[in-house]
Each structure stands twice: as C-alpha cells, then as structure tokens.
Image: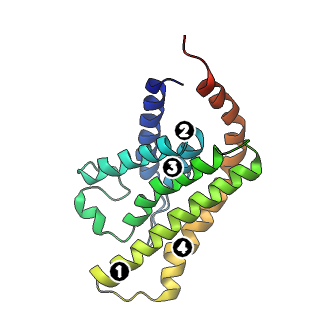
Amino acid sequence: MSRTKRVALCALFTALLVVSGFVRIPTPVVAITLQVQVALLAGVLLGGEWGALSALVYTALGLIGLPVFAYGGGISYALQPTFGYLLGLSVGAFVAGKIAKSGEASYARLFLSAAAGLGVVYLLGTAYALCILLFYLGETPLWKEFLVGYIAIPLCKDVLLTAVCLPPVKRLLPRLNAAVNEKRE
C-alpha cells in the first residue's frame, strides 16, 4: 500500500475516533464511547505504528483545543482522571496492531491482540485516573466505586463490543492485506 493510502487511512481512523467520542452514554464516572474499539481496529487493520499514529493525532487535536474529546478539549483535559484512557488508546492500538500483524489473522490471534490492547488501555487509564484523583485532586476514592466506575462498567462494554467487532474484522483483513501487498505500478 502506498504511503498516501496509509496516510489517508490514518486520517480516516482519526476522524472515526472523533466521531466515536461524540457517540457516548454518560455514566457517573466515565463516559461510555466506542473509542477503544476504533483505536484497536486502527491498530489491527493499519498495523501498530499507523494505528497508534491515528490515536496520537486524535489526542493532539484535543490537547490543542479542538473539542474532540467526550467532554471538550484543551491542554487542561490532561488533568482529568479519564485522560489516561485517551493516552492508552495509542499504546493499545500499537500493541494490538503488532500482535495482529505478527502472523496469520486467525480468531485466536485477533482475540489475543484485542485482549492485549484492552489490557494496555485499562492499565494506563486506571493508573492515570488513580494518580490524578490521589495526587492532583487530593481525593481518596472509595475502592468499590472506583473499581465499578473506572473498570467494571466500561470494561464489560469494551469486551462485549470488541467481541462483536472480531468477525467483521477477520473478514476485512484479507482484503486490506491484499491492498497492502499489491505492487505499485
């Protein structure tokens, strides 16, 4: 696939991340969006580097002030407890893409790549949230509410939606891989 096609697909996934941030179900703690699935999809379909780049561009757009995040934008958004999940999108896309592209696109490999990507997003997101709550906001969260609000509810949604996305992704990968491997004329 030409560099131009890769850049265009990267831009497309950045736009999809913006749109998926606006499709949200508000909860008391973390807005439930489709951003994790879009980021993992970018990593699996485009490869680790390009998938991560699409999420990094999305994060940069929000940090420079464009209201692309679930609740706005701007540099001060970095002090929100949920900002760690946005940082995790890039790393999660990278990990998912590297695992998915390391061999044949079987359901097992796609599941492993999605699980690893989700794990990275939640590890970074919850660690960041805990640090912001404790050290910046000076709040001591109740563990039950923290675990339910920042992990259990969003993770259940992400596992379910990711599982629903795997069959279409498996069908799409051969076509995209064929486009990647086509010779430029």
Rendered residue at 43%/24% (across/down): 4
Rendered residue at 64%/61% (across/down): 159
Amino acid tagged 2 = Leu
Cα separation between marks 2 and 3: 10 Å
Cα separation between marks 2 and 1: 35 Å
In the picture, the quarter occupied by the N terminus is top right
The 10 Å Cα crowd at callout 4, few under 14, some 14 to 19, many 20 or more, is some
The 10 Å Cα crowd at callout 3, few under 14, some 14 to 19, many 20 or more, is many
Circles 4 and 3, Cβ within 8 Å, touching? The answer is no
Which residue bears the numbered disc 2?
46
Q: Where is residue 140 in the image (x, y as percent from the top left)?
A: 37, 89
Residue 161 in sight from this viewpoint: no
Mark 1 residue element:
helix
Cα separation between marks 4 and 3: 18 Å
Which of pointers 4 and 3 lies earlier in the amino acid sequence?
Answer: 3
Circles 4 and 1, Cβ within 8 Å, touching? The answer is no
Circles 4 and 2, Cβ within 8 Å, touching? The answer is no
Q: In this view, does 26 lie above or below 19?
A: below
The 10 Å Cα crowd at callout 1, few under 14, some 14 to 19, many 20 or more, is some
Please tell me the numbered disc located at residue 133. Answer: 1
* Quarter of the view holding residue 116: bottom right
Which marked residue is nearer to the observer: mark 4 or mark 3? 3
Mark 2 residue element:
helix
Cα separation between marks 3 and 1: 25 Å
Which marked residue is nearer to the observer: mark 2 or mark 1? 2
* Quarter of the view holding residue 113: bottom right
Q: In this view, does 163 lie above or below 51?
A: below
Which residue bears the numbered disc 3?
39
Please tell me the numbered disc located at residue 121. Answer: none
Which residue bears the numbered disc 4?
151
| Colouring rule applied to residues | rainbow
